[in-house]
Amino acid sequence: MFKCVVAAVGAAFLSAVGLAQPVALPRPAVTGISHVVVFADDIQKSQQFYAGVLGWDQVPAGAASAGVRFYANHAQYVELLSPASPGLANHWDSVAFATTDAEAMRKYLGSRGVVVPDRVTTEADGSRSFAVHDPEGNKVGFTQDGKRPPAEPASAAQSLSSHIIHAGYVVHDRGAMDHFYKDLLGFHLYWQGGNPPERVNWVMMQVPDGTDWIEYMLLLPANPSAGQLGTANHFSPGVVSIAELQKKLEARGWKFAAGRDPWTLGVDGKMQIGLRDPDGTRVEFMEFAPVKDPCCSAYTGTQPEPSAKW
């Protein structure tokens, strides 16, 4: 009888221990790029570029920020912030991804060892967001869309692109970044390649629940110049036709370098035109679909398309 009691108590203890084990939290969906944030030394000069040239509607940022936002569609935007001091070598602040549940994502990342804030921030439009740091110390945000997005502006027809398809920034340790993006967040390899082909300069990691991607910009010098940082830290609006984009830019007074075509065919097989905002941040317009097979590796995900969200 005593043995039976001991056995029953032991079984109950083991059951309680089992119940006490932490439960793995599910990862909410990550559906695409939400926004990028860059520093602008002269906000008025940058307004002419983002609103006048790109044709993106300007909206004041939320109460948590002193910046201004330029919307490509109702949910994607570039935010400009004034730096604490002008003349920064690096004008890149952060990239943020859209998620279906910001609070669940905060808890999920915290359960996986990522340092997270105590709570999400809620803005006037109902959006909820928070930011963490990747393994190399870069700020990465997560935003859940609110129920009161900006209305379609009268200037929507002037927009050169309605979809920010990717963003890229300097990466030194691919393994550490893969743990963050691939193992924790579920991103997958979309394409990788370089110039020359046997060298990997660029690694594209696509979101798990959409078509946008982040690009690791590898192999920069130990102390990159402001120009090299402005090239590496970039974002990319998607377009159907680079040729049509060139016509629109020229009609708006944009001056390309004389004597050569402004577009290039990337080793990823997609046509591109690269612009620079007034502070040197690269805006890499890119066609949604490749026009030839890419160098170095095949695409492993769905190609992006124009956004219908205006």
Image (cartoon, rainbow, N blue to C red):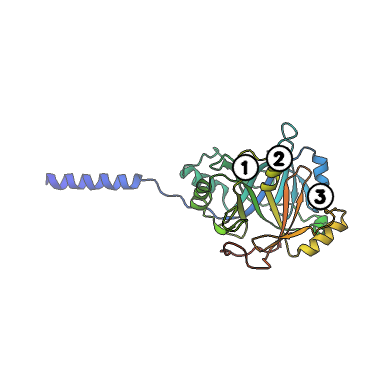
Q: Which residue is mark 1?
A: 221
Q: Quadrant of residue 224?
A: top right
As drawn, is 234 to the left or to the right of 116? right
Q: Which residue is mark 3?
A: 51
Residue farthest toward the top in the current orientation of the protein = 85
Q: Which residue is mark 2?
A: 226
Give the camera-side residue of 254 and 95.
254
SS type, badge 2: helix
Query: What residue is at 67 percent from the left and 49 percent from the top?
Result: 35
Q: CA distance from mark 2 to mark 3?
A: 24 Å
Residue 176 place in picture, x, y as percent:
50, 46
Mark 2 and mark 3 lie on one chain; the one further toward the N terminus is 3
Residue type (three-letter) at the residue carrying disc 2: Ala
| Mark 3 residue crowding within 10 angstroms, few (<14) / some (14–19) / many (20+) | some
Residue farthest toward the bottom in the current orientation of the protein = 292
Q: CA distance from mark 1 to mark 3?
A: 34 Å
* Callouts 2 and 1 close, C-beta under 8 Å: no
